[in-house]
Amino acid sequence: MDSLITPLSHLLRIPVLAVLTLAVTLLNPAFAGEKLKVFILAGQSNTVGHARAHTIATLFQSSATRDAQLAKMVFGEGSKLSKDVLDVQLAQAKKLDELTGGISNKKVKEMKPGPEKDKLEIEVKKRKESHQCYKDKMMSSCVISDRVYINSIADRNKRAGKLGIGYGASQDKIGPEYGFGLSIAQKVKGPILLIKTSWGGKSLNYNFRPPSAGEYLLSEKEKNGKKPVEEIKQNVGQFYNMMNEHVHEVLNNLKDNHPDYDAKAGYEIAGFVWFQGFNDQFAPEYRDNYKDNMVHFINDVRKEYKTPNMPFVIGVLGTPRTKEKVDENAVSVAQRQAAKHPKFKGNVLSVESYKDYSNYSYSIFEKGWPEHYHEWDTVGSDRPYHYLGSGAFFVRLGDSFANAISELMAKN
């Protein structure tokens, strides 16, 4: 951006025509004549995103070259943030937990009133304020894209604008969209728009059920339950429909969603990312039909958007954390199998989410997060079913999704 800023004193020495030419250059969209690349992201709570942004800094705990590159992508080339900064915070967080006993504040509460307790409460208050300042600094240091825009439904958090922090479950959280958008911008030309639709606790077999999957068969529990059978039947595929309604609404108002959209150049739906599966684990008819439902889903969304070979990426459920456990998960296996369907060769890929897991965050979680709360709060913000609410994980995963989409785009 600095290269676009010209000092006024220099402008005064430039001929009028040149100044006008410069003004037109600066004011015109940077991507005039370029097609708008649209990417759709959809799924349940781990697409919603429950990672507080400050936990992205956990990337600094890794010695992997990729994580160093991702940290630069998120915090910028000139960032003064580093492993040293994180290590200092972790040490301070440990001390705060030693003083308080963790989230319960048990050690302070158990002290008898008096000068000693008053002194400790003052110290704890200062340390907690310092801990919060660190989190605020990390969040404010995350880049905001001038090139990638997003229109997002993340449960109740509905927002649109430049891609940055805050398109997860709340305005200080992220899902995979943040890492995906920043990463895909390094791989494709032109303006980019992300459309995200995500709702927690939703299944593919029922909530996102695609039309070509056929009639939904009620379980005995549903047949004999309190909820009216007609109501259950009426809501089959409700979130599949809501997803498409939102996407079409955005596509019909592209200029409102990306200022660099050139109507003459048009747009293309360049890829679709699906990250879901948790709620399909718990009933045989959901697990056993996942592969077929996924194949139907891909076929139906391609038909919906008239994109027969649209690059499609399936995020494989990886909450069990290890390859061995993930391999035992029927939904994860079905997701891999769907991606390998013969008709999808060269245009569908599966991405293993467990490979991007934040094992560092897990090591602190395992110590007992309530007693080590402030240390834990530095590197994680949710439970294992939300990948520990690790910003490092979600940035890695978004990058993995972008790499897979980019690979498919190159083939097409």
Image: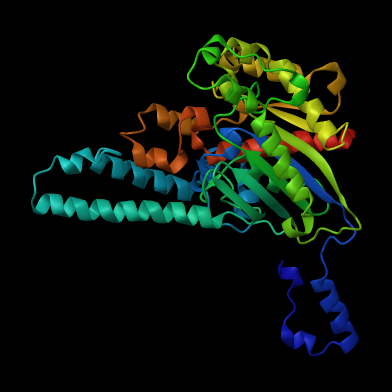
State the residue in front, 353 or 69. 353
At horizontal 84% and vertical 28% (from top left) the residue drawn is: 347
- The residue at the point 41 percent across, 30 percent down is 365
Q: Position of residue 199 (x, y in %)?
A: 58, 36
Taking the spot 67% from the left edge, 15% from the top edge, the residue there is 333
Quadrant position of the N terminus in the picture: bottom right
Q: In terms of image quadrants, where is residue 33? A: bottom right
Along the horizontal axis of the image, is 119 left or right of 209?
Answer: left
Residue 163, placed above or below residue 404: below
**Residue 193: where, in percent of width, then height?**
75, 50
Depth check, front residue: 172 or 307: 307
Picture coordinates of residue 118 (x, y %)?
Answer: 14, 54
Q: Give left or right: position of 374 versus 164.
A: left
Q: Is residue 318 visible?
A: no
Q: Where residue 113 sits: x, y (%)?
A: 9, 48
- Say whether residue 84 is left or right of residue 99: right
Q: Splitting the image into 4 quarters, where does residue 5 fall?
A: bottom right
In which quarter of the view is residue 160 placed?
bottom right
Report the label total. Answer: 0
Residue 202 showing in the rendered view: yes
Q: Residue at x 78, y 22 (%)?
A: 212
Q: Is residue 322 above or below residue 34?
A: above
Q: Is residue 272 above or below residue 126?
A: above
Q: Nearer the viewer, residue 87 or 228?
A: 228
Q: How is the image coloured?
A: rainbow
- Relative to 103, 284 lies left or right: right
Q: Nearer the viewer, residue 38 or 205?
A: 205
Quadrant that contains the C terminus: top right
